[in-house]
Image (cartoon, grey):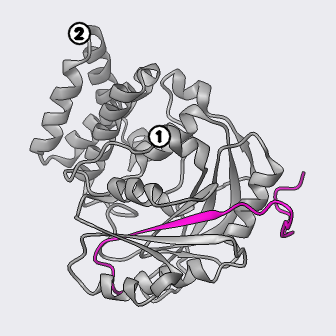
Amino acid sequence: MNPVSQETHSVYNPLVSIIIGNYNYEKFIAKAIDSALKQTYKNIEVIVVDDGSTDNSRKIISSYGDKVIPVFKENGGQPSNYNAGFESSHGDIICFLDSDDIFVKNKVDRIVSIFESYKDIEWCFHSLQLIDESDKLLGSTTTVNYKSGERDYRQILQKGKIPPHIPPCPTLCFTRKLLEKILPMPTTKKMPGSDHYLKFIAVAISKGFILAEDLTLQRIHGNNMGTLREDKLYMRAREYLFTGYWINKNFASLKKFADKLSSAGIALDWQSGKNDFENSHIIKEYFNSSSLAEKLKINLIALYYYINNTFLSKFK
C-alpha cells in the first residue's frame, strides 16, 4: 500500500468530527473554522468549543449558524475542551484543531485514506508547517525528519522510555474507539494548555501511523503557550508533572513511563529557577504514591536530565 497516494476513497465514507478548541482568539477563529468547512472531504461535522472567551469569539462562532456545532462552556483549559468536544461529537474519526491554526484543504481526505488503508491503526499523526500571524510560511518546523509509516510505541512506553517526538494538537487524529478508552481525561485550571496526556496514552495503548505530509499550518504568535518559547519553562514542567501524575493514577501499567515524565518535569522545574508552588505540590503528591526506591530513582534521573541539558532539550 502506498501511504502517499492522493486518491479520494468513495466506498469508505466515515463521519469525521473536527473539534476546534478556542479561548479568546477572535483574531484567528474564523480562519480555523473556514479551513474545517472547506475540506475536500465532505462527510464532516465541525464542533467549536469555546472555553469561556471574554472577547468577540462567541459572536463569531454563532455567525456560522448550523454550519457548526457550538459548545459554549466555562473556562477550564484545553484538556476540558477535548472532553466537551468529544462528548458532543458523533464521528468515527476525530481530528483536533486549535483555533489559531489552519487545516490544509485535503487534510481530512488524506487522514481518511490512511485509516482505510491500515485497518489495525487507531491514531494518525502528521507533520506540519509553521506560519506567522499574517499566514506567512516560516522557514522552520517542529516535525523534523518525519517519514510515513506505521508506528507501534507500546512496548517502549511499557518499559518507561520516551517515544520519538509526537506532534501537537492540530495534527492529532484518532478513531472514536480509541478515544472512548482515554476521554474524558483529568483536567485542572492550573495547567490550561496541554495535549500530553491524550497523545501519550494513545500511543501507549494502540498502534498508529505517522504521515510525513504538512496537513496543518500551525501559527506562531505572541500568545502561544509553549511552541518555540523558552520563557515559560515552569509551565512546560507543569505539563509533564501533571501528565505523569494522571498517567500513574489512571494507567498503573504505565508506572515506569509516568516516573520518567515526572523526572523530566522536575528537571525542567529546576531549570526554570522559579520555585513554582503548584509544581512543588504536584511533585509531593506524586511522591506520596511512590516507594523510597522509586523516589530516589526519579530524582536521580531528573538530576541526569538537568545536568545533561542537551538531553533535556527534547522535552522543551
- Residue extending farthest to the right is 1
What's the distance in space between the residues labelled 2 and 1, CA to CA?
A: 30 Å
Q: Is residue 19 magenta?
A: yes
Q: What amino acid is at disc 2?
A: Leu
Looking at the picture, does residue 269 appear above or below residue 74?
above
The disc placed on residue 292 is: 2
Q: How many numbered marks appear?
A: 2
Image spot of residue 113 (x, y percent): 78, 60
Image spot of residue 204 (x, y percent): 54, 33
Q: Earlier in the sequence, mark 2 or mark 1?
A: 1
Image spot of residue 86 (x, y percent): 47, 56
Residue 34 image-quadrant placement:
bottom right
Q: Is residue 139 magenta?
A: no
Q: Is residue 123 left or right of residue 303?
A: right
Residue 266 image-quadrant placement:
top left
Circle 2 residues within 10 Å: few <14, some 14–19, many ≥20: few
Circle 1 residues within 10 Å: few <14, some 14–19, many ≥20: some
What residue span does the magenta drawing correspond to? Answer: 1-28
Residue 143 appears in the picture as rendered: no
Q: Is residue 214 left or right of residue 268?
A: right
Front residue of 163/30: it is: 30
Residue 17 image-quadrant placement:
bottom right
- Look at 38% across and 58% down and name the residue there: 84
- Look at 52% across and 20% down and name the residue there: 159
